[in-house]
Structure formats: C-alpha cells, structure tokens
Amino acid sequence: MIVLKRVASKPGWGPAPRLLAVLLPALLLLAACQTTPEKAIDSDGAAPTPTAATISVAPLAPLPGEPQARGKSAIVVDLDSGRTLYSEAADAPRYPASLTKMMTLYLLFEAVDQGRLTLDTPLPVSANAASRPPARLGLAAGSTIAVRDAIQALAVKSANDVAVVVAEALGGSEATFAQQMTQQARALGMNRTRFVNASGLPDPQQVTSARDMAVLARALKLRYPRYAHYFTARSFTYGGRRYEATNNLLGKVPGVDGLKTGYIALSGYNLAATARRGGRGLIVVVMGGTSERARDREVTALLERHFAASYASSEF
C-alpha cells in the first residue's frame, strides 16, 4: 500500500502552502457545487473485477513549484513525430480536472483490447458511483451500463458517475484504479502526473502538466485508433436523453477530431484538442483558461498558426 503525500507538503515550495491550506477547503467546496457553461464539472454477464493488488508507484519527478490555481499552460505537439512545436509553462504543475478521464479511457481501451472486457460487457453501478456530482448520467445504484456506452459517456458527456463505474470495474476500487492510472502514466513518460481519482473531481493531490496531457493525448490517438470515433461525436443518446459534446471545436474548427475538455475552480478551463489537415496532425493543450470562450479561442489560434506554418515548409 502506498501513501501519497499532499502536493503542498513538498519541501522547498515556500510559504504559499499555508495560504493554500486556508483557501483550499473553500475552493474545493465551491468547485464541487457550482454550475458552469460546461455543466458544473466535465471533469466538461457481470463485468469481471480484477483482483485488487498493491501497486508500486514511482515518486513524482521534482516539480518547479506548487500547482498554481488556474495557472496558465499551453503546448503544441506534432501528432506523428511527437516533436514539441510550441510551449508555455508546459512542465509547470497544473490541475487536470476532467482531462483525467483520458487516462480512465486509456485503461478501459486497454482492457477491451486485452479481452478482459468487451464493448457489450455490462458494468455494475455502485452506490458510490451513483452519488458522484455533475456532470453525470444519473445512473441508478444497482443498474449496469455497457462498456460502449461508458466510453461514449466519458468522451462526450464527461460523466463523473461513469468514471467511477469504470474505476471500480477495472480496479476493484477507485483508489486502486487511481494507482493503476499513475503507474500507466509513468510507463508513458508522464513523470509529472499523479492521479488520485478517475474523474478529475477536485483534489489537491491530483497533479499533471500540459506536456504530460499532450503525451497522453498522443498515446490515445496512436495506440487506440479504432476508438477515435468516440471522440468525434458531437452528441450521443442514452436512456432516451440526448447529451451534447463539451468540446465546442468539433464541427466548427476544420480538422478537429477530439479530444477532451476539463474544468474545476482550481484548474480553470482546460482543453486537449487533436486535429488533422492534409495528412498532418497536431495536438494542442491549453490549461488555465479564464473562460470556455477564451480557451477555445486560444486553442483555435494555435492550431491555425501551426497548420499555416506546416503549409509554408516541408515539415513542421
């Protein structure tokens, strides 16, 4: 069993943690209760349950300071080569919010590809999962949801109840699944990321960086292309209700084909977007946006700038 220390307790981070310790309870309460244009927190046979096991998780790489509430970060990466084309505070610690669900989906795709689940496997809904705050599908405790519907709910609706359903099905508990998420992050080279839940709901220990989120977005696109269509959907229907995608760029910005939005009070407005034009692919991650509109505008501008640069030369 591992013990995860609070990020604010890291040595050498100065006096700011005292202020953070005072403000965090209020911030977390506000984040869990408020409603935003992305519907509060988008973070916008019986399923086999693997035996829960203690997982050894490597410590975080040294971070250049404490995670900054609504800290601004951005990065542009060539999807095919992985080369960084632009960065702004890309390695600074940030709160992922619902970008977290990219890793929840990564591990769910892995389970299907390995044959541990199928797209039709019904996943049981616990009382714990059903109690998660919005955004959610409103699943009833004791019911089930098929894996294919769970994928769509995470990719389009960013449903917090579904994230916990997946975590409990694959890890036995959300805490164990979060350890698996962090272990997978290390395997991908995401050394500045720690997951403690599957949804991205507020927790000061849930930490990442824009670069790590770009690494994860690229891994999703290149390793699991057969699931790419889930991220392009602008809406989906479940239980007779229609849910609109939280990614506002789909169908509006040429070439955009995913990937994930996120918002909590601590993070500001996050977006990891992928796009392809003329055979060239880009990943753009913006974290800490002041609003949905400002975040979307910045992601769009970065896409346009770097696609234009690619047309002006033979390579990025």
Image (cartoon, rainbow, N blue to C red):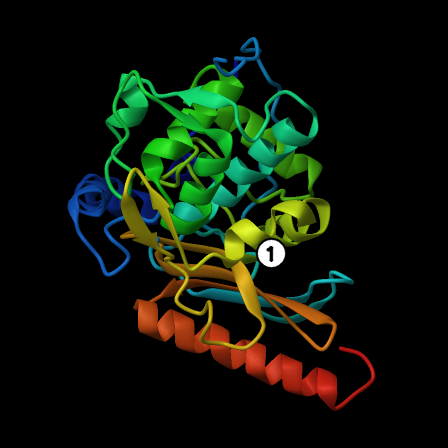
Q: Decide if residue 204 is on the left or right side of residue 2.
A: left
Check disc 1 and report the residue beneath it: 214
Task: Let me know if residue 187 appears in the view.
Answer: yes
Q: Is residue 219 above or below residue 303?
A: above
Q: In this view, does 179 lie above or below 245?
A: above
Of all residues, the one furthest to the top in this rendering is 51
Quadrant placement of the C terminus: bottom right
Q: Quadrant of residue 304?
A: bottom right
Residue at figure coordinates x 39%, y 38% from the top left: 199
Q: Nearer the viewer, residue 181 or 227?
A: 227
Where is residue 169 shown, x and y percent of the image?
Answer: 48, 20
Give amino acid for label 1.
Ala
Q: Nearer the viewer, residue 140 or 64?
A: 140
Of all residues, the one furthest to the bottom in this rendering is 312
Per the image, label 1 sits on a secondary structure element best described as helix
Where is residue 97 shown, x and y percent of the image?
Answer: 39, 47
Where is residue 160 shown, x and y percent of the image?
Answer: 34, 37
Task: Give the total of numbered labels.
Answer: 1
Residue at figure coordinates x 40%, y 27% from the top left: 145
Q: Is residue 123 above or below residue 96?
A: above
Residue at figure coordinates x 54%, y 47% from the top left: 63
Of all residues, the one furthest to the front in this rendering is 240
Q: Decide if residue 271 is on the left or right side of residue 309.
A: left
Is disc 1 surrounded by few (<14), some (14 to 19) or many (20+) residues within 10 Å? many
Residue at figure coordinates x 74%, y 91% from the top left: 312
Task: Let me know if residue 95 appears in the view.
Answer: no
